[in-house]
Amino acid sequence: MNPDIAILIARRLGIAVITLLIVSFAVFFATSMLPGDTATILLGQSATPEAVAGLRKAMHLNDPAILRFFHWGLGFLSGDLGRSYANNMEISALISDRFANTMALAGLTTLISVPFALTLGITSAVMKGSLYDRIVTVLTIGVISVPEFMIASTAVLIFAVYLQWLPAISFVNEIHSLSDLLKMYAMPVLTLTFVVSAQIIRMTRAAVIETLATPYVEMALLKGASRRRMVLNHALPNALGPILNALALSLSYLIGGVIIIETIFNYPGIAKLMVDAVATRDLPLIQTCAVIFCAGYLVLITIADIISILSNPRLR
């Protein structure tokens, strides 16, 4: 590998690690400043001042914030995620099943949205200026302009309220057949697929159009190459870097979209767990979930940056 490329990749990985540390610091202190006292919320309003003071001491809530941050950070690095205040359980046990549910939702969305979006993006670029291209462009811009919660709410109104084809809430634990699986995941996956696919379609279309306008593709066309061969053998291999970069960037939108979708559909994932933890001021659980989401986002963004570096012919 070119030493310059290795240095750029190492620098980008270092930036990702530093960013994660800064975000962890910000998340810890932001959650510490949430209104309300954790001990009072856990014990109830009828708790005596002595009981509240004893619980605060047992939970080390009276320690300086910076000291609690270092204890939490060292424990996180060693694999000890701490205990949940509200459930009195190990956080690792709480998030294990929820993490699998969130990954299943993200995986199904990726499995459907990526082939769908690539097909529309590539065909739209090849048929640039046609009625098909204009329809795809208008629809993708429309979907991008609408927030996730609006798409999810519309899906609930149409498929759950009016048509009554699908349940409005995803009861993942009640899946006993393929039919149950399709019903439970249909609306969450459909909503996320719309959001993610729109971004991928736009960026894929732009990358393929840019590649199709290059001199070597025009030369292949003048030499008698068929349109199918021109796209598959000449345009796509050279647009692969930008397309992969677009995929990584677009899939990073799943991080924010999952939080909204899991809340609306009551899907039992990490995002729903984090939202519930905010209501009970379960600080360790909030902090752990937030860092997991931040780490996932940084991994996807870093992959996109590395792909961009490796696909740059000037650097190679």
Image (spheres, grey):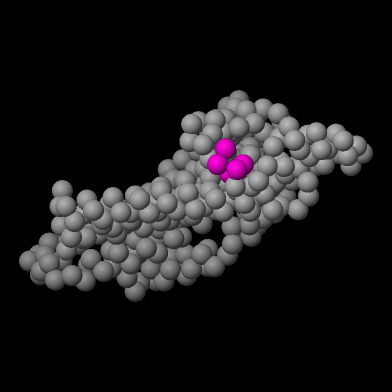
Single out the residue that lies furthest toward the top: 176
Residue 198 pos. (x, y %): 46, 60
> Is 270 within the magenta?
no
Residue 229's place in the image compared with 217, above or below, is above
Single out the residue that lies furthest toward the bottom: 129
Residue 89 pos. (x, y %): 67, 27
Q: Is residue 185 left or right of residue 167?
A: left
Could you tell me which residue is drawn at 76 percent across and 53 percent down?
Answer: 35
Quarter location, residue 82 = top right
Residue 201 pos. (x, y %): 40, 60
Could you tell me which residue is drawn at 35 percent across and 72 percent down?
Answer: 130
Residue 281 pos. (x, y %): 72, 44
Q: Is residue 112 left or right of residue 148?
A: left
Q: Nearer the viewer, residue 302 or 26?
A: 26
Could you tell me which residue is drawn at 21 percent across and 60 percent down?
Answer: 312
Residue 145's place in the image compared with 47, above or below, is below
Q: Nearer the viewer, residue 202 or 300?
A: 300
Single out the residue that lies furthest toward the left: 223
Q: Is residue 228 left or right of residue 295?
A: left
The stretch of residues the image draws in magenta is 67-71
Question: Is residue 153 something that shows in the picture?
Answer: yes
Could you tell me which residue is drawn at 15 percent across and 52 percent down?
Answer: 2
Which secondary structure class fits the magenta region best? helix
Residue 269's place in the image compared with 306, above or below, is above
Q: Nearer the viewer, residue 303 or 132?
A: 303
Q: Quadrant of the C terminus?
A: bottom left
